[in-house]
Image (cartoon, helix red, strand yellow):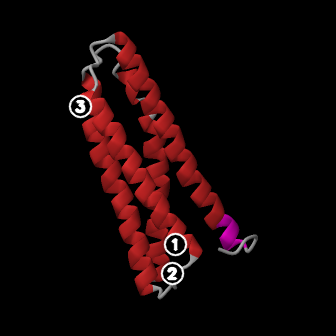
Amino acid sequence: MIETILMTHSLLTKLFLGFLVGGLFMPMMTAKNPQSLKKVSLIYTAIFQGIITMIAFAGLVAMVVGEYPMSLAIILMIVIWAVMMYIEIRKHKLVKIANLENPVTYKLIRGVFVKVGIVQILLVAAMVVLMVLRAKGVISL
């Protein structure tokens, strides 16, 4: 049973990475209609929060069912989860209040959208690499 839960956690993480990569293209898709970036950002943020919460819940269930102790790796995952949620909420609020009719503002917001996406991808990828190295016994967290 614990293997299934961990597999679900892993698959959700891979799905999330794919979602984040897809999110890098959102500003480009809204280039013809800058105001649509607000709607896209709202939907993107909702899906982002849904997937990342599913990952956290699957991890919590795995920790409880598998009786894993609170290790540095788990604490690191919790911190990364909180940081990513904070960044995403701040990004959405920025897009929400921005005057996207102004081309300079729209260009700036597009850049922020992409840069935040890259940072989020790097955070998730770094955690995946750490967990793979931990599983192979290269490092101990």
Residue at 35%, 63% in the rendered image: 54
Residue 135 lies in magenta, yes or no?
A: yes
Q: Earlier in the sequence, mark 1 or mark 3?
A: 3
Mark-to-mark CA distance, 1 and 3: 34 Å
Q: Residue 5 placed where, x, y %? A: 43, 75
Q: Amino acid at mark 3?
A: Lys
Q: Residue furthest right?
A: 138
Mark-to-mark CA distance, 2 and 1: 6 Å
Task: Characterize the magenta stretch by its predominant secondary structure.
Answer: helix
Res. 74 mark: 1
- Residue indicated by mark 2: 70
Q: Are marks 2 and 1 in contact (CB under 8 Å)?
A: yes
What stretch of residues is rendered in magenta? 132-136
- Which quarter of the figure has residue 88? top left
Q: Residue 132 placed where, x, y %? A: 65, 65
Q: Amino acid at mark 1?
A: Ile
